[in-house]
Amino acid sequence: MINTEVKIPETTENFDELLKEQFGEKGITGSVVKGTIIKLTPDFATVDVGLKSEGRIPLREFGQKAELKVGDQVEVYVDRYEDKDGNIVLSREKARREEAWQDLEKCLNSGERVNGVIFGRVKGGFTVDLNGAIAFLPGSQIDIRPIRDITPLMGITQPFQILKMDKVRGNIVVSRRVVLEETRAEARAELINDLKEGSVLEGVVKNITDYGAFIDLGGVDGLLHVTDISWKRINHPAEVLSVGQTVKVQVIKFNEDNQRISLGMKQLEADPWQSVAEKYKVGEVYTGKVTNITDYGAFVELEDGIEGLVHVSEMSWTRKNVHPGKIVSTSQEVQVKVLEVDADKRRISLGIKQCTPNPWAAYVEEHPVGSVISGKIKNITEFGLFIGLSDEIDGMIHLSDISWDKSGEEAVKDYSKGQEIEAKIIDVDVEKERISLGIKQLTEDTVSSALEGFKKGEAVKAKVTGHDEKGVNVEVNGVAAYIKKADLSKDKAQQNPENYNDGDILEAKITSVDKKNGKLGLSVKALEIEEEKKALEEYASDTSNSALGDALGAALKKNA
């Protein structure tokens, strides 16, 4: 279709002159003009702009969702004329770009935001379609924080801020981050103004640390401490949270001065400890799962948020001084008995060994006090012998219960580790898990019988049977005794044990009679002190009587 207002020149030169006459010196090339669609094909639209010939524009330049029909008025860009056929080259895309540039320049000057669509990647950033004008979005301007996957942001219309434009070079730089920061500042001010303790908000996990997680509440961050994530034990926040996750939280504390916000998640759920005393009765047995093992015991989870401690002493009847990790393992299901419940302090004391028969009680039932047992010496210590009574139970023989006539240190030399011996059960304490044994109790206490004839404080004669650097061994009427170096004499010069030979007779005072342990205490020094005291008392008495006689004689003479 040809515009009737334009005369067809016979030559190209005449056509150019006519254009100049109609459109001015610059002509129509490089301008945006209105045209009419006169024909549509699957790929092209033929547009009449009122010149010599029509131009064809690819349909893709109108956009994927464009609905076109013959007769529609459209603005197009006159690019150039074909030299060969004289056809006009038109562009809808360039027309849109020209329109967009004009609008964008206005937005740049006014600071107004523009809408665009991120549609591609380039080195250092992304390309954005601003309604026909192509802009560059630097990677640093995509968001407030780094984004690993930008796919969700592509292909959708969203606001941008123009940072700079250069029409000559065709460069436009935009920022999405500036828009987000401004929006964030507005939201922050509004949020801070309305924020109160107890408020329930939605936020996004921004960062995770060992002690908690920082939650973006929309312009302001709050700290969700690891202890406030769940009522149940959590070793690390990453066990239940991930960066980018949306969570519902409650404001626990808000400091208006420094604008620090403490958040909690578990506060949005019922506290399981409120009903713990009703659910878990002392003495009852429950099944739980081991969640944590320490040097002093193991924590067992009875339900979500409810854990109790099994102290190492409550783990086994027989395995003592063993690390809890050698008795139970993490995630193991175990049966436990409730020993104590303190809901106020949020503590439950549990026991594992109480769920099995007490081997100490069973052993004592079969072997009561007075029973004679046999076993091997498992260990020798400074205070006695440990005897293996069964695979699980040991008994102890104190040094004082080894022999009637020998001291413990001397008597223990007669025994060795692994030696099979007999002993008598002399005492049992099931609660403290102790069984006391004695070897000397297997024989008659001849020493105790012999000690019946001795009384504390009386003087006896002792026969020297030996000596060492600490004292002298003696015998009194068949009973062995020991006089310490300091008790050999009042005079320090006479306290040397080497001054005494076997067979020497010493007079000493009995200072103690220990029938239970078969020991007789003697002291020469004590006897010497006692005799000296008596002598002084007798001397003082004689002196007093003599003075009284002289006084009476003098009085009689005076009266005569």
Image (cartoon, grey):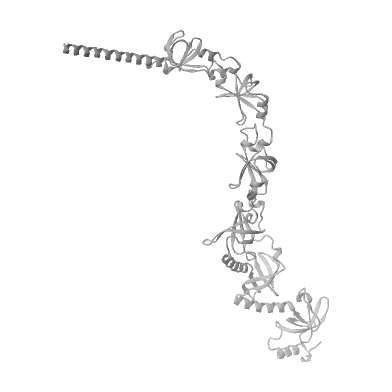
The quadrant in which residue 120 appears is bottom right
| Position above or below: 445 against 212 | above
Q: Tell which residue pokes out farthest to the front in this image.
A: 560
Q: How many marks?
A: 0
In this image, 319 relative to 5: left or right? left
Quarter of the image where the C terminus is located: top left
The quadrant in which residue 104 appears is bottom right
Residue 86 can be seen, yes or no = no
Percent coordinates x, y for residue 507 in the rendering: 42, 11
The answer to which of 99 and 422 lies nearer the viewer is 422
Name the residue rendered at 60%, 20% in the picture. Answer: 416
Q: Tell which residue pokes out farthest to the top in this image.
A: 503
The answer to which of 312 and 519 lies nearer the viewer is 519
| Position above or below: 274 against 319 | below
| Position above or below: 495 against 47 | above
Percent coordinates x, y for residue 509 in the rendering: 43, 14
The answer to which of 349 and 210 lies nearer the viewer is 349
Residue 12 can be seen, yes or no = yes
Name the residue rendered at 65%, 57% in the picture. Answer: 243
Name the residue rendered at 60%, 75% in the picture. Answer: 111
